[in-house]
Amino acid sequence: MELRAAYAECLAELMKEDKHVVVLDADLSKASGTRKMYDRFPDQMFDVGIAEQNMASIAAGMASYGFKPYIESFTPFATRRICDQATISIAYAKRNVKIVGTDPGISAQLNGGTHMSMEDIGVMRSIPGMVIYEPVDVTQLKAAMPVINDYDGAVYIRLFRKETPDVFGEGYKFDLFKADKLRDGNDLSVFVSGMFTRDVVDIAEELAAEGISCDVLNIHTIKPIDKESVIESARKTGNVITIENHNIIGGLHSAVCEALAQEKVPVSAVGINDRFGEVGKLPYLREAFGLTKEDIKKAIVDAASLK
Amino acid sequence: MSYDLKEVSKDIRCDIMTCIGHLGVGHIGGCLSIVEALAVLYFEAMNIDPKNPQMEGRDRFICSKGHAGPAVYAALANRGYFDKSELLTLNIGGTHLPSHCDMLLTPGIDMTAGSLGQGFSCAAGIALASKLENDGATIYAMVGDGESQEGQIWEAAMFAASRHLSNFIAFTDYNKMQIDDYVANVNDIAPLGDKWRAFGWNVIEVENGNDVDQVSAAVKEAKGLRNSGKPTMIILNTIKGCGVSFIEEMGVANHNANISEEDAKRAIEEIRG
């Protein structure tokens, strides 16, 4: 199942229960997976056209009337394009608006550099009070949506919208403010967000056989980061690496380094090295940006040798 | 209860002078230009309860030109939302009355505004929400003429007409000036009425937006257009700094000016006649 289908399914449930849950699109409802909901919820779905800034402020106004708006677009237009509206209309005014950006980082693929947000987490992370959540699979997203809907405040959902390999299984419990421990280990803390999570779990399994024991955490909520778990893991292993589909500046790596600023521990990084995107399919882009599974594994092995 | 709107306007104008004079500096020109609109809204047109600022189904006013906060605060204090003595805390650290309107700080402020263009979009969202709730409220917004250079104003204009938000009545404070120069010299917004008509709005042009009778008549006319299926823009031809001759004479320099307590005293004498 594509993550956008799971997202739309969750939204439909929430909208059915509460007529104040509304969705605003800026001509990308098909990409977000919510187009079909327009017939089912005609009084709760609003396509405002290609005007993302207007969409963000309209949502803030609706929130002032007790509505719970979700605004949707591609990640660059849901973040950097509306940076001031997200800051002032939504965050500064403490409006309960959920911002959903699809196709983060290299996952924008054929839309290329103009549509690839390598900086969206950095932009949103510097807005006071903004919560940033990046799902990894259908199970987690389905568990997260009701929790996020109940949270009274602005949340940015960084949604990889296509199919993703499963990471979590039955019985999974989601806590918006608590990172998920995926593997216990003692040699190296591997903190991963988003689309590379399954790869990292597999790599950790392989490395265990090779004598490297990884402590793997999925940091699904990058802000506020689960500092307690991050520090606890870092103290246990004394060595950290972060893995993300974002510029190393401003994203997960930065958040982890801030959390560990008082700790004497090296923090290696896998991510996008301060460069813009380009067109290509995912296998090409992962290679071009040094983000293949092999690249990630090598970086983890290199990091493990630092201790 | 009906109020003498001319007297109310004088009171609001004097209180603007008092609080900005007490502070020593402020957005005086664009505060004084909207006084009559505020008098008509808060003392005649709007269904509000100063004792219950969050009353459900109330009419709302969004001052999208958020820097006119002091004028709105003066109107709110005169209407009984809070004690007039609070006006002297304008812009002092910890105040409930910041330079730009903040819904989290001030009773009676319906939306935070200050980053130009945004308040108007928020107002459109509020108008849509009110329409969905079918609560019969009227949503009012005030837009600056300089602010009308923001693209977001026109995004919201298109949206409000497209959604037939006939519960939405907006004003343009057309005082013809902005910070750097006359609006016409910077990036002209004329012909303003034609623009709003072209965007699908009813347009009412008020020759003298600093005449309470003309403003009152325009708001009544706008309310009568509720079944038109269109939002309404009331273009108020105003004078920036209206009512205080030495401030009017500053011209474009009156956007944000130093005002001493002595200046304020002199202004109040002139306003009271």
Image (spheres, coloured by chain):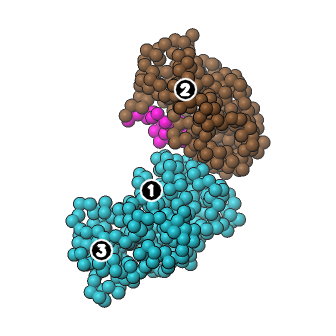
Chain colours: A cyan, B brown
Separation of residues labelled 1 and 2 (CA atoms): 36 Å
Q: Residues within 10 Å of mark 3 (few under 14, many from 20)?
A: many
The residue nearer to you, when weighing A240 against B268, is A240
- Left-right relation of A226 to A134: left
Q: Residues within 10 Å of mark 1 (few under 14, many from 20)?
A: some
- Are discs 3 and 2 located on one and the same chain? no
Q: Which residue is mark 1?
A: A123
Q: Is residue B87 visible?
A: no
Residue identifier under label 3: A189
Which numbered dot is residue B252?
Answer: 2
> Eyeballing the image, is A269 above or below A203?
above
Disc 1 residue type (three-letter): Val
**CA separation, marks 1 and 3?**
26 Å
Please check whether the numbered discs 1 and 2 fall on a single chain: no
Disc 1 sits on a residue from what chain? Answer: A
Secondary structure at badge 3 equals strand
Please state the extent of the stretch shown in magenta in the rendering: B94-111
Overall secondary structure of the magenta stretch? loop
Magenta span includes B249: no
Measured as percent of width and height from the top left, residue A307 is found at 22, 75
Marks 1 and 3 on same chain: yes
